[in-house]
């Protein structure tokens, strides 16, 4: 299994990196997970996102970092 980070971002190197059998399977699983998230109509993300944004901004405020969301 190739776990080395990519040194550059040219398409050929990325394709080669992802074309190893273990990486192909990993990529397939990631795509499947994203498809499931996109198909989810439970409303959980719409309910949770405002709370998550507020928490992230509050935490960043505690360390004097700029806000992530300007709403």
Image (spheres, rainbow, N blue to C red):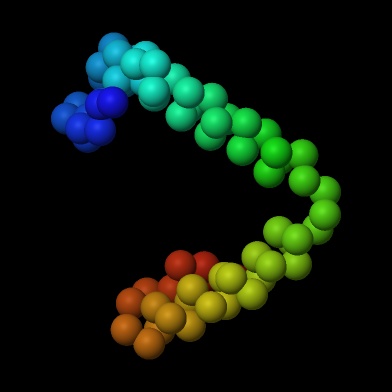
Locate residue 66, reporting x and y percent. 37, 74
Locate residue 60, reporting x and y percent. 39, 78
Residue 66 visible somewhere in the drawing: yes
* Quadrant of the image containing the N terminus: top left
The vertical placement of 11 against 29, above or below, is above
* In this rendering, position of residue 30 left or right of residue 47: left
The residue depicted at 30 percent of the width and 14 percent of the height is 16
Q: Quadrant of residue 21?
A: top left
The vertical placement of 21 against 43, above or below, is above
The residue most toward the left is 7
Residue 11 visible somewhere in the drawing: no
* In this rendering, position of residue 32 left or right of residue 59: right
Locate residue 25, reporting x and y percent. 48, 23
Q: Quadrant of residue 37?
A: top right
* In this rendering, position of residue 37 left or right of residue 12: right
* Quadrant of the image containing the C terminus: bottom right
Which of 68/37 is in front?
A: 37
The residue depicted at 65 percent of the width and 65 percent of the height is 49
The vertical placement of 25 against 52, above or below, is above
* In this rendering, position of residue 36 left or right of residue 62: right
The vertical placement of 56 against 19, above or below, is below
Locate residue 10, reporting x and y percent. 26, 19
The residue depicted at 34 percent of the width and 16 percent of the height is 20
């Amino acid at each position: 299994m190739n776990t080395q980070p990519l040194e550059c971002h040219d398409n050929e190197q990325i394709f080669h990196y992802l074309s190893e059998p273990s990486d192909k399977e990993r990529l397939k699983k990631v795509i499947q997970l994203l498809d499931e998230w996109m198909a989810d109509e439970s409303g959980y993300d719409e309910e949770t996102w405002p709370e998550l944004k507020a928490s992230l901004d509050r935490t960043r405020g505690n360390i004097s970092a700029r806000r992530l969301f300007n709403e």
